[in-house]
Image: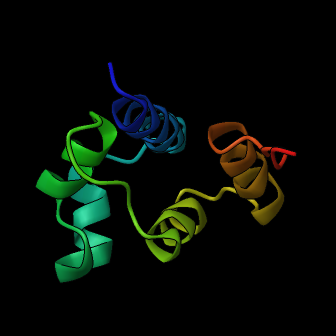
Amino acid sequence: MTETEKLRASIGRELRGWRTASGKSLRDVEADFGKKLNKSHLSQLENGKAPSPRLETFYDLARFYGISLHRTVESLAMIFPPTTPED
């Protein structure tokens, strides 16, 4: 599995976890987001089959699922760990 595939899988697991914890279905999300995000695309994101969502979309989904900004940032930090510059 490539680094990109691992990244997509991590993001997908996080998004799916948020959605299932909130009790929302893919249809619920689609009904709220409309043309901005349909259930097919969200399913692909959750399964690591689509390019990572824009930060704005990630944040909008977190808000929709009732995830605090603090927890959203923590999740992003786990997915994108800080790196140290090489000397």
Query: Would you place residue 45 above or below residue 38 in this image?
Result: above
Residue that extends furthest to the top in the rendered view of this protein: 1
Q: Position of residue 9 (x, y in %)?
A: 39, 31
Query: Would you place residue 64 above or below residue 73 in this image?
Result: below
Which quadrant is the N terminus positioned in? Answer: top left
In this view of the protein, which residue sits in the foreground, 69 or 66?
Answer: 69
Q: In the rendered picture of this protein, how many numbered marks are placed on residues? A: 0
Which quadrant is the C terminus positioned in? Answer: top right
Q: Position of residue 17 (x, y in %)?
A: 50, 34
Q: Position of residue 58 (x, y in %)?
A: 50, 63
Q: Position of residue 6 (x, y in %)?
A: 42, 28
Residue 24 in the figure: left or right of residue 31: right
Say which residue appears at 74% left-offset and 46% top-offset: 77
Query: Would you place residue 82 above or below residue 16 in this image?
Result: below
Residue that extends furthest to the bottom in the rendered view of this protein: 35
Residue 33, located in which quarter of the rendered image? Answer: bottom left
Say which residue appears at 57% left-offset and 60% top-offset: 62
Residue that extends furthest to the left in the rendered view of this protein: 40
In this view of the protein, which residue sits in the foreground, 29 or 87?
Answer: 87
